[in-house]
Amino acid sequence: MENKKIEYFILRNYTDLPEKNSGKDVDIVVNPKKLALSKKIIRTIFKNNGFVYYDEAVFDSLHCMHGINLQSGHGIHIDLLAGYRAKGYEPMDFMSLYGKVIKYKNFYVLKEPVNSVMLLVSKIFGYKHPVIKEKYRQQIYNAYINDTNEFKETLRYILSGKAYEEVDKRLEENDFGGIIEYGEIISENIIKNSIKHHGIKSLKGALGFLLKSAKKIAICYRKYERSLAVVAPDGAGKTTFINVLSKKIENGYVSDENKIHVYHFRPGILPNLGEIGEKAGVMKQDKNWEDPHRRAPAGFFSSVFRIVYYSMDYIIGYKKMVRKDVHYDRFSVFDRYCYDLIADPERTRIKLPVCMRRFFVFLCPKPGLTFFLWGNENNVYGRKKELTVDEIRHQNSLYKGMAEKKKGFYILDADKDVEDIADEAIKIILEYYGEKLN
């Protein structure tokens, strides 16, 4: 970046760099005018160091860049920030911040009092329920005590009036609980001063943030979702596979946040019918999960009600829950999916013609990827004797038929070692949701 004359500085958790990283990612703030060139440099570095796969998520001015090496099982997560903005607002413009950098080892960082003020702002601004970890509280307080004048000067630029006085008073008392309680007023004051200092630029940034958020989460969420389902008869090893795959995803994406949200069968915004019946006092919920076919199929009208009920959970719940996962940049992983209504209707006590079941499955939203774990029926039965060999063979045949016809449906050999099939799956996931650095 320095060779290309890109103004930058590294935020937080930089003391052990470049030998090791005390956090999960590296935050690099760059001149917004040099964002495209900065991204190109990082992608080139990923490629030249064996990181074959690349994925990126964008939140306002934040570009989460992931380089993933499947062969070594490693990932690098770099957060590239085009200036220092929050929800479109700019508490302090990039060049003002860049004027307060110093050389640390062989790279640029903000002076510690300025860095700590911005850390405080990032943990408070825009949050309904702010959280400041103990290690950050200590860092901020130490910076306040060690260089009070520069800390206050920076804080006074971002806050004004009573908001500044209250935060200054609480910092002096090392009272971060009081600062958190005052969080909403602090956020309002930051917005006020951002508009005061940057006028139209701040208003334009805030409007842009709202429009981008609406597009990403409300309107075009399916474009940004990372969703997948895992289907198979009981005993094929779905839970173990999902656990191993989740670990590989977490390692590759190197994230502080939980990257995986696992759903069981359906989104779950509607409660189980047995739970409703128990609350209504008309029945006791059967919780013998060891026998999935323990109860006789329901009658025709009850079966219709059941399939409509479950379909509504998929149609409405998928939009609600997956949108939320998009907001937090999480993978939506379904352990079973609506395809069970075709392959294993007995589990939900549905007894309807297959054409009716296929119709309702057709109405449900589909994950981007679905993995069918095929295993020899005798091997599957040997692991878990909940289904008969004939039933396992029957379900295998139905799942395989769907996999061969539907786009994004992959067959994995469950008789192989789980690590091997998880490696196959993550390669498919990265090629589908990310890109290869050729």
Image: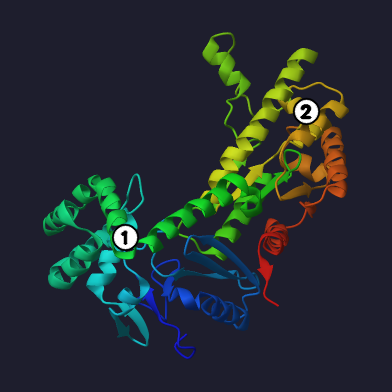
Does residue 183 sit above or below 197 in this rendering? above
Pair 2/1: label in front: 1
Q: Is residue 87 above or below residue 392?
A: below
Residue topped by disc 2: 345
Image location (x, y in percent) of residue 427: 70, 63
Disc 2 and disc 1: Cα gap in Å? 57 Å
Q: Residue at (72%, 18%) from the top-left corner?
A: 305
Residue 361: mark: none
**169 with respect to 180 (left or right):** left
Along the line of sight, the residue nearer the viewer: 235 or 162 = 162
Q: Please, is residue 274 above or below residue 425 in the view? A: above
Q: Which residue is mark 1?
A: 194
Q: Is residue 316 visible?
A: yes
Q: Quadrant of residue 206?
A: bottom left
Quadrant in the rendering for residue 196: bottom left
Q: Pick whichever of labels 2 and 1 is earlier in the sequence.
A: 1
Amino acid type of the residue tagged 1 in the rendering: Ser
Q: Are marks 2 and 1 in contact (CB under 8 Å)?
A: no
Instruction: Describe the element under mark 1 as helix, strand or loop.
Output: helix
Residue sticking out furthest to the bottom: 3
Which of the pair 223/357 is nearer the observer? Answer: 223
Residue drawn at (76%, 19%), measured in percent from left and top?
304
Q: Where is residue 380 drawn, in percent x and y?
A: 77, 43
Please name the amino acid that badge 2 sits on.
Pro
Task: Please indicate, yes or no, whether residue 388 appears anywhere in the rendered image.
Answer: no
Category of crowding for the residue at label 1, using alpha-carbon neighbours closer than 10 angstroms: few (below 14), some (14–19), many (at least 20): many
Residue at the top extreme of this rendering: 282
Left or right of 279? Residue 343 is right
Count of numbered labels shown in the rendering: 2
Tell me, what colour scheme is on the image? rainbow
